[in-house]
Image: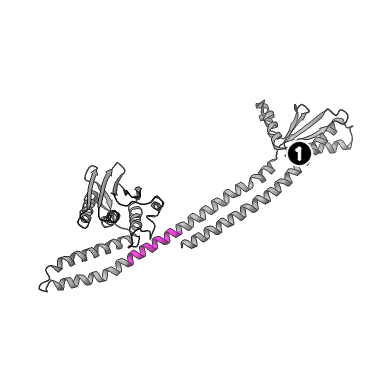
Amino acid sequence: MFRALLHWKNLLALLAILIVSGTIFYSQYLAKKIAIRERQVVEQWAEASQFLIRAPVNAEILFATRILTENKAVPIIETNERDSIINFINLDTAKVAADPTFLQKRLQHFKQAHPPVIWTDPIISARQNRYYYGESLLLNQVRYYPIVQLCIVALFITLILISLRSNYLSLQNQVWAGMAKETAHQLGTPVSSLEGWLEMLRDVPGTDKIIPELEKDIRRLQLVSDRFGKIGSKPQLEKTDLVIQIQEMVDYMRKRSGAGVRFSLEIKAVQPINVFLSPPLINWVIENLLKNALDALSGGGTVSVLILENARFVQIEVTDTGKGIPKNEIAKVFNPGFTTKKRGWGLGLTLSKRIVEQFHHGKLFVKHAEFGKGTTFALTLPK
């Protein structure tokens, strides 16, 4: 699925590049043709303007007048040889009347945009009229059209990628749920069988020491089956004292850790802290965080659990003094299959993050990590 998503991304990116590149080249081609045509219009307008000044009344005057009046697109400012403004056309007369500097500003802009069309008096060569011009609305639209189209294509591709990612996440959720349900189902049969064998063992003499240990293992298997069953369907959230839940898990892990490991639990909150949660699933999350902390210690060090509270959420921080996480791997710790241990599937933190964020609308993240010094995971749950 990931390869297919990447393939679609590459195809969409290539398609976008081809569309935008073709549009840019074609728009530039049209813009150049329009620009040449607009300069010709300005040259004709300049010739017609001077012709009307010196020509007698005849039919040619009508033609020159038509040239002058038909130019309704290209803005032109006419100046003399000293660049004093004589006339203008196709500029906003309201702005000209309201702002005395408007014409001078447009003149400076036109000077930077194009070289002027110059008419020299055939009798008095020192007399020149210069025609500075800007770009028509059509030319500006052609120039900026590729940018508009690029934005549209980018929006289109973004929507497609969001849709593909949404489909990918939906499929991933279905895979996780299906895997969890199947695991719970597969565990159910042998656990039921073990319970039956346990009842039969109670009648066998000399099994008094074996039965309590078997009961512990069976309860453990039942707990694992219950956890997977709850992942496979939406769990029922119960109002629970979070402090008691965490204390139980810390005590549970303390009994199963080495002699060189020290545990500390600090509570900076008013007790009890009641939060709506699924106790088996949150226990699993805390257990995963504590197990990861113990694995990082390699037999010696400190695991600290801190509970903080404010008006909006409760935060649990699990800190170890172990080997830490390199900076380039922090973003990968919640990815499926990522693990730094020789044994393991690399699914503990992935499932924990899904339990916290999907079922409890909280957050699970790496708050601090320093290679060789330790790691702090933070879990926040809304109140």
Q: Residues within 10 Å of mark 1 (few under 14, many from 20)?
A: some
Residue 177 in the figure: left or right of residue 53: left
Front-most of residues 249 and 382: 249
Type of amino acid under label 1: Asn
Which residue sits furthest top? Answer: 100
As drawn, 261 above or below 134 = below
Q: Which residue is drawn at 40% across and 54% down?
A: 332
- The picture quadrant where one finds residue 122 is top right
Q: Where is residue 382 in the image (x, y as percent from the top left)?
A: 31, 47
Residue 113 in the figure: left or right of residue 321: right
- Circle 1 is placed at which residue position? 71
Number of residue marks: 1
As drawn, 63 above or below 188 = above
Q: Which residue is drawn at 83% across and 28% down?
A: 127
Which residue sits furthest left? Answer: 205
- The picture quadrant where one finds residue 75 is top right
Reply yes or no: does residue 172 show up in magenta: yes
Q: Is mark 1 on a helix, strand or loop?
A: loop
Q: Where is residue 140 in the image (x, y as percent from the top left)?
A: 67, 42
State which region is magenta.
Answer: 167-182
Front-most of residues 9 and 58: 9
Reply yes or no: does residue 30 show up in magenta: no
- The reply to whether residue 92 is in sight is no
Q: Residue at x 67, y 29 (%)?
A: 102
- The reply to whether residue 157 is in sight is yes
Residue 107 in the figure: left or right of residue 276: right
As drawn, 143 above or below 188 = above
Chief SS of the magenta region:
helix
